[in-house]
Image (cartoon, rainbow, N blue to C red):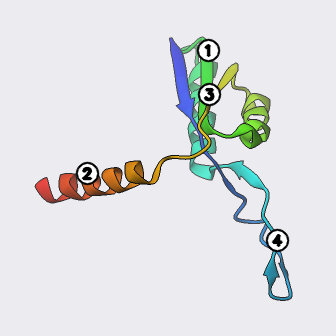
Amino acid sequence: MKILVSFKSVPDPNDVTIAGAALSTPKSVINPFDEIAIEEALRIRERGEATEIVGVTIGVPAVDEQIRAALAMGVDRAVRIDAPSIPTRWRVFFVRWSRTKRHMS
């Protein structure tokens, strides 16, 4: 069995420095919840229930650092889907769709 684990690059919550009134840009890391998912996939592979772990993320080439981090954690292969940005109308559609779905249930 192969396991596909998605992960997202987020600003490091522990790397916020304040210099006067200006904030520096924090470095990016793998979302901590996604790290937990990667660790669980590794445990499943160690038990012999999986043969390969593939990580996938969507973003710009700057997320390559997080791809290397996932590979260092033990992911066998990683894929980056190149998507520079999501058009605004997609975001609006998703928000409307989510709200509609919540009210229906």
Residue 43, above or below 20 = above
Tag 3 residue? 55
First in residue order: circle 4 vs circle 2 = 4
Looking at the image, which residue is at 76% across and 43% down?
62
- Pick whichever of labels 2 and 3 is earlier in the sequence: 3
C-alpha distance separating marks 2 and 3: 27 Å
Please tell me which of labels 2 and 1 falls first in the chain.
Answer: 1
Q: Is residue 66 left or right of residue 86?
A: right
Residue identified by numbered label 2: 97
Q: Amino acid at mark 3?
A: Gly
Which residue is the extreme one toward the right? 19
Q: Nearer the viewer, mark 2 or mark 3?
A: 2
Query: Within 10 Å of the Cα at label 1, are there few (<14), some (14-19), or many (20+) other Cα atoms?
Result: some
Whether tag 1 and tag 3 are in contact, CB under 8 A, the answer is no
Q: Amino acid under label 2?
A: Trp
Q: Identify the disc placed on residue 24.
A: 4
Q: Which mark is residue 52?
A: 1
